[in-house]
Amino acid sequence: MGNVERQSINYYLRPAKSIERKFFCDIFRKLCLFSPINNYKYIGFGARYFIDFNLFHKELGIEKMISIEENATEEKEQERFEFNKPFKCIEMIFKNSSEAINQITWDSESIVWLDYDKIFSKSMLNDIKNVVLSMLPNSVILVTCNRCYSIDEHIENRFVKFKEEFMEDVPIDAKKTDIRSKIFHNLINKMINNKINEALIEKNRNIAEEEKKLIFKQLVYFTYKDGAPMITTGGIIIRKENETVFTEAKFYEFLFNQDITQPYDIYLPNLTYKELQKINSKMPCENWADIDLFGLNEEDLQKYMELYRYFPYYMESRFIG
């Protein structure tokens, strides 16, 4: 996470990101069928705000936590991060993600969120492979990045540059049109899944028993835009012998991942507090037609009905002393 991004992004005021984190909590609660959730180690990029660390510690009881921060090279910068840690159970690693992954002790199941705010790059795929090679079965890997490739308007030049950067990681059937901003997330998702499975093929070479071999189950595929257009994809690594447990956990019962082949767009309709209160008073409700639209369009109402349990609320307050 770069210095510019860290200065310009207020992580408290990113509504789609807020919803995404709550989606994750719903999924993570199901991990208890594999191992008690408080046995898991959470590894992420906390920045100065540690929003995800706060949520996952309070909601899930995770106490083993590691935050990676690559741009705090000066002692004063590091002191500020240490000061802003909300809990003493968070360990800081002040290195880039590649170095940090090699430093971490992978001695328990883990939830790893590589929450990049940069444009998709080759180095991200390298990080993903190293994480998968390191993590234990029943662990989760999530990856977020900017889903634009380049601001270069000439797609021919862009695709040439793309192939030069990613080389053997570019799928054989990739076309120059695949890197267009509106659909580039599909190629990113495919390349990340390919890299995860490539790492598992490598790991499985050392596993003789077929039922002990590792497989990847994708759990999330989101697009959203809190300013920059982003993609999040990822899932869980399990042994083949645990596929029945995975099925029993009903990971795909949520509206946001019932069709994992297509991205779920976290779009927030622009509603006033009064409108929110009116709709909330009618929830839960399965049929949008049962709610008086009072001027709202049908699409916004239906979207809010999907997200109302996850919808963030912000307010301004004054303290008079």
Image: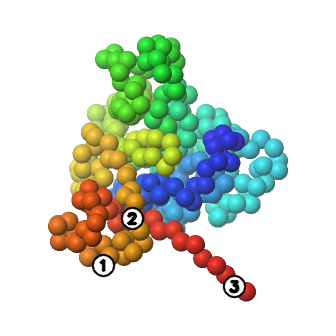
- The CA distance from mark 3 to mark 1 is 32 Å
- Asked whether disc 2 touches disc 1, contact meaning CB atoms under 8 Å apart, the reply is no
- Asked whether disc 3 touches disc 1, contact meaning CB atoms under 8 Å apart, the reply is no
**Which residue is located at x 54 percent, y 40 percent?**
116
Where residue 149 appears, x then y in whole percent? 48, 28
**Quadrant placement of the N terminus:** top right
Q: Is residue 213 above or below residue 243?
A: above
Compare marks 3 and 1 and give the one earlier in the sequence: 1
Q: Which kind of residue does numbered mark 1 sit on? A: Ser
Q: Which kind of residue does numbered mark 2 sit on? A: Leu
Where residue 111 appears, x then y in whole percent? 48, 50
**Which residue is located at x 51 percent, y 46 percent?**
227
Q: Name the residue under label 1.
A: 281
| Residue 271 tag number | 2
- Along the line of sight, the residue nearer the viewer: 317 or 16: 317
Q: Is residue 166 above or below residue 128?
A: above
Residue 138 visible to the viewer: yes
| Residue 214 tag number | none
- Along the line of sight, the residue nearer the viewer: 4 or 48: 4
| Residue 320 tag number | 3
Q: Which kind of residue does numbered mark 3 sit on? A: Ile
Q: Residues within 10 Å of mark 1 (few under 14, many from 20)?
A: few
Q: Quadrant of residue 97?
A: top right
Relative placement, left or right, of 38 versus 285 is right
Q: In this view, does 146 lie above or below 220?
A: above
